[in-house]
Image (cartoon, helix red, strand yellow):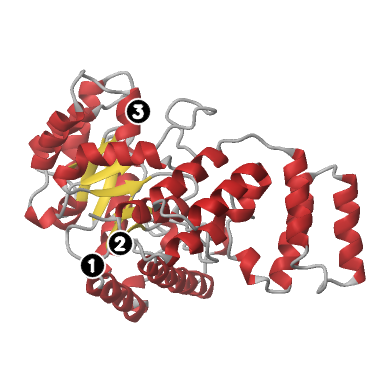
């Protein structure tokens, strides 16, 4: 079973979403942008591998204006060496990748653009030379007050896709219009796989049926060349509108879900705001990591914990030296992350972490930090001053932690 996340890691300086405005389109601008995106994709995949993350969703922005009419460049040929190298790395390390374009609409002109966009995503995956277990995830789209017509229109336009795009396409249930049963019905007709999203199902269940029965049917839509069944997992952010993804995966919720789906041996894509941070947590909770992993993870979280609650900071410090498991550690971390802002703890942690920088900072930098700290009109601004200084003086223990991220 593989665990993955979408598009942009939080903890390394790598992005595949560089873009530029349409009026500035030129070969040089396009080439430079794509070159950097592909270099960073390679960096991300290697970083993921180091952290036992074997699934990744590639951003649709990897090739700027990939499906736009202005882009008539043969980018698969221009970047063949880069694409081959990335594809070979994916294949040799048993990594699974996917992409997730936008959805269909009833407007004919927009529909043609949507088909072209799907073909662009397919071309990118094909250019990597990866097999058909590497998928394009799609929602059916809006119901537009006529669900049956929308389903009919989708089936008609599916036939307009290339054979390769049809083989890569999988359909996902959504939280408003098309529940998992709608998706399964059309997947059975088109003979393509379905992806079950637990959070979308929570808000748009359709029927009252246990998850095992649903997944039995979902699993049957995946044939051998499709690879293992894929699931999307997320927790709900209770402070936002229904269906919003949480900032962080609650490990207890995830493990309870995993017990329900484990027998299907699925690959699970996490849809969560903190991306690779939650993915690493889930991987470490399912595997049996080396003993040092607990200490390495504590080094990542420790100042975030101190900032929230000093008594829990002490509890975590004690736990990592005990026989307690990674899961016990992450349960305590999850408890901490739900705590509200505490000014006293925030200030004390700032002063503590300032100790890593103050002997390196110039007098001007010291004055800037202390003036901001003493006034404390904008706590995050003060913390950002510290972040910039930590980066300037390469204080790796701080900048490699999660302190400035979560």
Residue at horizontal 29%, vertical 75%? 89
Residue assigned mark 3: 175
Which element carries disc 1, helix, strand or loop?
loop
Q: Nearer the viewer, mark 1 or mark 3?
A: 1
| Image location (x, y in percent) of residue 273 | 49, 45
Residue 139 appears in view: no
Contact, mark 1 vs mark 2 (Cβ under 8 Å): yes
Q: Residues within 10 Å of mark 2 (few under 14, many from 20)?
A: many
Which one is earlier in the sequence, the residue at label 2 or at label 3?
2
Q: Tell me: 295 left or right of 197.
A: right
Residue 159, image x and y in percent?
14, 44
Residue matched to label 2: 54
Instruction: Between residue 182 and residue 308, name the one nearer to us.
Output: 308
Residue at point 17%, 59% (across, down): 132
Whole-angstrom CA distance, mark 2 to mark 3, is: 27 Å
Residue name at image x 41 percent, y 35 percent: 235
Q: Is the residue 273 above or below the residue 321 in the image?
A: above
Say if residue 26 shows up in the picture.
Answer: yes
Q: Say above or below: 218 vs 152.
A: below
Tell me the distance, in whole angstroms, between the alpha carbons under discs 1 and 3: 32 Å
Q: Residues within 10 Å of mark 1 (few under 14, many from 20)?
A: few
Residue behind mark 1: 94
């Amino acid at each position: 079973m593989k665990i993955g996340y979408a598009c942009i890691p939080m903890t390394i300086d790598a992005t595949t979403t560089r873009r530029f405005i349409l009026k500035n389109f030129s070969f040089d601008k396009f080439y430079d942008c794509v070159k950097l995106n592909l270099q960073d994709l390679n960096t991300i995949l290697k970083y993921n591998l180091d952290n036992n993350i074997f699934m990744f969703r590639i951003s649709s922005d990897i090739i700027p204006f990939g499906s736009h009419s202005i882009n008539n460049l043969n980018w698969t040929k221009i970047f063949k060496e880069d694409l081959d190298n990335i594809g070979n790395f994916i294949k040799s390390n048993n990594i699974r990748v996917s992409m997730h374009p936008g959805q269909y609409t009833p407007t004919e002109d927009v529909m043609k653009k949507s088909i072209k966009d799907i073909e662009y995503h397919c071309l990118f995956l094909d250019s990597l030379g990866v097999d058909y277990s590497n998928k394009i995830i799609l929602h059916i789209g809006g119901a537009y007050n006529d669900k049956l017509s929308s389903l009919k229109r989708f089936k008609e336009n599916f036939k307009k896709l290339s054979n390769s795009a049809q083989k890569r396409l999988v359909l996902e249930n959504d939280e408003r219009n098309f529940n998992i049963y709608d998706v399964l019905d059309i997947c059975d007709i088109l003979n393509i796989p379905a992806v079950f999203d637990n959070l979308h199902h929570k808000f748009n269940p359709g029927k009252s049926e246990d998850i095992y029965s649903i997944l039995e049917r979902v699993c049957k839509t995946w044939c051998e060349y499709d690879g293992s069944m894929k699931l999307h997992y997320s927790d709900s952010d209770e402070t936002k509108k229904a269906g919003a993804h949480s900032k962080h995966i609650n490990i207890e919720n995830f493990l309870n879900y995993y017990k329900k789906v484990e027998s299907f041996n699925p690959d699970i894509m996490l849809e969560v705001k903190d991306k690779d941070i939650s993915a690493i947590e889930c991987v470490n909770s399912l595997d049996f990591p080396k003993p040092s992993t607990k200490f390495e993870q504590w080094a990542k979280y420790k100042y975030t914990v101190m900032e929230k609650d000093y008594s829990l900071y002490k509890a975590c410090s004690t736990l990592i030296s005990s026989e307690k498991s990674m899961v016990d550690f992450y349960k305590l971390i999850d408890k901490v992350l739900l705590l509200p802002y505490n000014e006293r703890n925030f200030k004390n942690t700032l002063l503590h972490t300032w100790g890593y920088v103050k002997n390196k900072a110039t007098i001007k930098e010291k004055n800037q930090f202390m003036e901001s700290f003493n006034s404390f009109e904008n706590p995050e601004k003060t913390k950002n001053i510290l972040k910039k200084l930590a980066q300037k003086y390469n204080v790796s223990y701080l900048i490699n932690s999660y302190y400035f991220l979560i």
